[in-house]
Image (cartoon, rainbow, N blue to C red):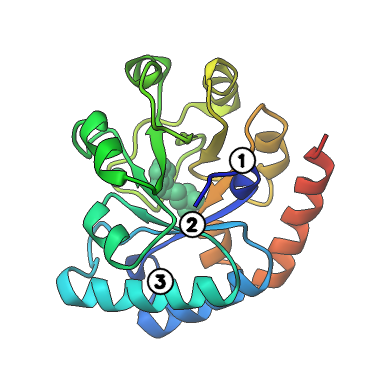
Amino acid sequence: MIFDAHMLARYFVLGTQDVRDEAKFFEVLTAALQSGITLFQYREKGPGALIGTDKLRVAQKVRALTHQYHVPLVIDDDITLAHAVQADGVHFGQGDGAPEKNIQQAGALFVGVSVSTPQEYARIADLSGIDHIGIGPVYLTHSKADAKPAIGTAGLQAIAEMSRWPSVAIGGITLENLAAVLNTDVAGAAVISMISQSDDIAQTLQFWQTLSTKKEP
Ligand code: TZP
Ligand code: MG
């Protein structure tokens, strides 16, 4: 699929480890798909994450659901799985191996890369085949055990404005700080807990949509 920066507006990231069980995972994902997310990343990682055939089975169900709601699908850090389920994109962190090799193996999938500092950005700035970057963690996050230090909105803006690609903010984003995040040069925000821990996913997405619309030029 051809990447479009509008996909980054409301980017939801989730794996079964982020919720109580698989049933809850699909309940939360379905609500988010029904409520206006623009991109979904299946990120099965960390303590309790599924592997092997269980991960493949869940990913296949995720692909069917995302197709049903016409929302593009990104797979985190697993090119083989991304191709196996015919995902639209793939995402790599700094610890996920040589970016050149990852980009080459991604083939027709669009590619996102995580960046936490200007130094990390500089290391990928000359590569071709990247479609967007994810910048963060902006704030303290409880969803990623090995997260780098929070960079704040000033750190976020510094990287967003030097980036030759559209960017999306990630890490510790809440209903309270979302407006400040979207006030920077990012194309959108990526969240786990703001949606997965929400008591009312439709209302959370409705609020987010209001802020995204204000951001449109
Ligand atoms: N990468 C940087 S922070 C993060 C990832 C995957 C976790 C974001 O989760 P939350 O709950 O939105 O802080
Ligand atoms: Mg990764």
> Observer-nearest residue: 40 or 200?
40
Residue 87, image quadrant: bottom left
Residue appearing at x 68%, y 70% in the figure: 35
Q: Is mark 3 within 8 Å of ligand 1?
A: no
Residue 157, image quadrant: top right
Q: Which residue is mark 1?
A: 5
Rendering coords of residue 158 (x, y %): 56, 17
Q: Is mark 2 within 8 Å of ligand 1?
A: yes
Q: Which residue is mark 2?
A: 192
Q: How many marks?
A: 3
**Does residue 138 sit above or below 176 in this rendering?**
above
**Does residue 181 sit above or below 28 in this rendering?**
above
Rendering coords of residue 118 (x, y %): 42, 16
CA gap, disc 1 and disc 3: 28 Å
Q: Amino acid at mark 1?
A: Ala
**Does residue 11 sit above or below 52 in this rendering?**
above
Secondary structure under badge 3?
loop
> Observer-nearest residue: 144 or 66?
66
Residue 15 - label? none
Q: Which residue is mark 3?
A: 19
Rendering coords of residue 1 (x, y %): 49, 52
Q: Earlier in the sequence, mark 1 or mark 3?
A: 1
Q: Callout 2: few (<14), some (14-19), or many (20+) C-alpha neighbours within 10 Å?
A: many
Residue 168, image quadrant: top right
CA gap, disc 3 and disc 2: 10 Å
Q: Callout 1: few (<14), some (14-19), or many (20+) C-alpha neighbours within 10 Å?
A: some
Residue appearing at x 72%, y 31% in the figure: 183
Q: Quadrant of ligand 2?
A: top left
Q: Amino acid at mark 2?
A: Ile
Rendering coords of residue 57 (x, y %): 28, 79
